[in-house]
Image: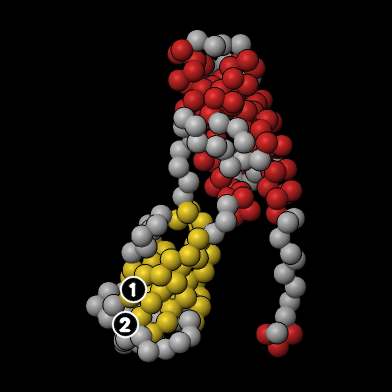
Amino acid sequence: MATITTYRTLVANEVGDTSARAQNVIDDGIKAVYQEMLLHTAKWLINPIEEDVTASTSNRYITPTKTYSEFRHILFKEVGDDNYYELKPISEEEYYSFYINSDSSRPTGFYIKGNLVYFDVVPSTAGTVKISGVEVQDELTGSIASLIPDRFTYILVAGAIAWFKAYEGTPDASEYQKIYKGSYWGQGRIDGLLGGMIQELSTKEPVKRPKLFGR
């Protein structure tokens, strides 16, 4: 797998600048683009982790010990119960509209605020919360191996080139940005090479078909 040195060499050769000043700018671009790519693709590239966190009757939230880029499942099990129950995701707005005056009971919903998990109600009984999610990844530095598969190397390189050219103020910066993530990324639509990567990886997930009577 590639490291930041691998990407740096490719970007520097492409932009024709191997100076120490350029290296600093290129490295910053690589780190930023790497994290952006993981933001869109981590759920297909990184194995989820699990942890158990104790929930008390005095707080409506728990603090995970890990930092997550994505929470996949939140389950709750009361003390003395052998079974976990999956909590449904709600929004903070829903909490203030429908649950704020609720008495304490077993939570059935949750929402995320920062890295905290808030319940719809204060637990009436202490319990254990099982969290499944994707952990935030370290910055790409030194000898840390990239999680981006080698076949997608040029996507990261194109993004880093766009970053470097934008920093330099060269007119072709926008063209590289379009190559990297399409013409409409400013409107929240990802196309270009990054969009193709997302599409390819997403096909690895099985198609979710409607269930008959919940089965």
Crowd band around label 2 with a 10 angstrom C-alpha radius: few (<14), some (14–19), many (20+) = some
Q: Nearer the viewer, residue 122 or 169?
A: 122
Residue 193, placed above or below residue 47: above
Three-letter amino acid code at the position of disc 2 = Ala
Please say if 34 is above or below 175: below
Does residue 114 lie above or below 101 as drawn? above
Q: Mark 1 points at which residue?
A: 54
Q: Which residue corresponds to mark 2?
A: 126
- Which image quarter: residue 11? top right
Callout 1–callout 2 Cβ contact below 8 Å: yes
Q: Which residue is drawn at 47% across and 21% down?
A: 25
* Lower position in the chain sequence, tag 1 or tag 2: 1
Compute the Cα span from label 1 to label 2: 8 Å
User: Does residue 98 appear to the left or right of 6 in the view shown?
Assistant: left
Picture coordinates of residue 55 (x, y %)?
Answer: 33, 75
Residue type beneath disc 1: Thr
Quadrant occupied by the N terminus: top right
- Which sits in the foreground, 163 or 189? 163
- Is there any visible trace of residue 177 in the rendered image? no
Q: In this view, does 42 lie to the left or right of 208?
A: left
